[in-house]
């Protein structure tokens, strides 16, 4: 693996496909940095709730998020996110944040700000695995290699329940599945940066593959493409 070349790998897909874990492990295997763009939208949602900004007041939300100067501490693994120079990782996965984040992520002006920030991060960290919903389609259209992870909604719902440390007495599989499908619908139907599979992405159905198997597959595909690129350059 050449260590002096820029290489941007994008991983997009809906919730519960294991994107974050896969992206983090792939980055670590290939010696690349890891960017969790969902954390940025979650941070914006947390700011909206904690600063008591009304949903309709998108102007105040966008200017407050801009003033928060969201950034990552790259000395941590995985990198932690900060707002106003204060770590907010502990806050962004709370249920109230998860509930409003799709709405927040649908605000066009906020998305433009995030896309700009993510491209700056890409310029500062040109050897990067980045995951989200629009990384291959909008933010890094010229990425070296693009993946799109998918899985059956029931499988994704069960993974989400496990991830949250819940059991089915707290929330039924059907209810979690309904929430996931609702969120997919919101993420896919917005006009700016909707969740789509880029035409040049490698689509992987993770329903029946364990995380390590998915990482193996993505690593193999990436190494094959690197080898082909080096061959072509000869
Ligand atoms: O991957 P996640 O669950 O942490 O993402 C949180 C929300 O942010 C989810 O509703 C999708 C949205 N998101 C987005 O619209 N664009 C991204 N690049 C990343 C996440």
Image: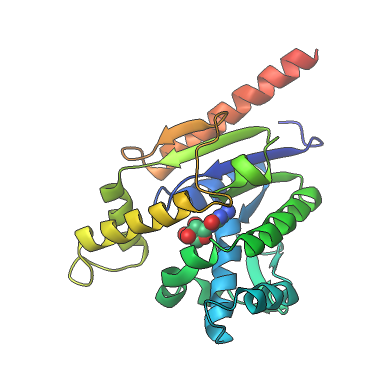
Which quadrant would residue 48 be assigned to in this image? Answer: bottom right
The image quadrant where one finds the N terminus is top right
Closest to the observer, 75 or 87 = 87
Q: Position of residue 189 (x, y in %)?
A: 46, 51
Q: Is residue 159 visible?
A: no
Q: Which residue shows up at 54% across the image and 73% down it?
A: 45
Report the number of numbered marks. Answer: 0
Q: Nearer the viewer, residue 18 or 75?
A: 18
In the picture, the quarter occupied by the C terminus is: top right
Q: Quadrant of residue 224?
A: top right
Residue 7 position, x and y percent, is: 72, 37
Residue farthest left in this picture: 169
Q: Is residue 144 left or right of residue 169?
A: right
Quadrant of the image occupied by residue 75: bottom right
Left or right of 166: which side holds 133?
right
Display colour scheme = rainbow
State the residue at coordinates (55%, 35%).
198
Residue 137 higher or lower than 220, as above or below: below
Residue at 43% x, 49% y: name it.
14
Residue 91 lies left or right of residue 60; in this view the side is left
Percent of width and height locating residue 231? 73, 14
Is 187 placed above or below 218 here?
below
Question: Does 165 sit left or right of 229 as displayed?
Answer: left
Vertical placement of 124 versus 168: above or below? above
Residue 39 in view of the camera: yes
């Amino acid at each position: 693996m050449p260590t002096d070349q820029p290489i941007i790998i994008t991983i997009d897909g809906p919730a519960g496909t294991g994107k974050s874990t896969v992206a983090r492990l792939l980055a670590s295997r290939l010696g690349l940095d890891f960017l969790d763009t969902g954390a940025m939208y979650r941070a914006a949602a947390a700011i909206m709730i904690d600063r008591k900004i009304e949903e309709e007041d998108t102007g105040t939300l966008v200017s407050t998020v801009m003033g928060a100067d969201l950034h990552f501490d790259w000395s941590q693994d995985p990198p932690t996110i900060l707002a106003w120079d204060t770590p907010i990782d502990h806050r962004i996965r709370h249920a109230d944040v998860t509930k409003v984040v799709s709405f927040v992520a649908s605000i066009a002006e906020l998305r433009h700000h995030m896309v700009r920030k993510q491209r700056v991060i890409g310029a500062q960290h040109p050897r990067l695995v980045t995951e989200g919903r629009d990384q291959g389609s909008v933010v890094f259209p010229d990425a070296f290699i693009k993946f799109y992870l998918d899985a059956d909604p029931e499988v994704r719902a069960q993974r989400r329940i496990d991830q949250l440390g819940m059991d089915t007495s707290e929330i039924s599989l059907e209810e979690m599945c309904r929430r996931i499908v609702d969120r997919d619908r919101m993420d896919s139907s917005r006009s700016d940066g909707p969740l789509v599979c880029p035409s040049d992405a490698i689509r992987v159905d993770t329903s029946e593959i364990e995380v390590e198997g998915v990482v193996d597959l993505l690593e193999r595909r990436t190494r094959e493409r690197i080898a082909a690129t080096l061959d072509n350059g000869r």
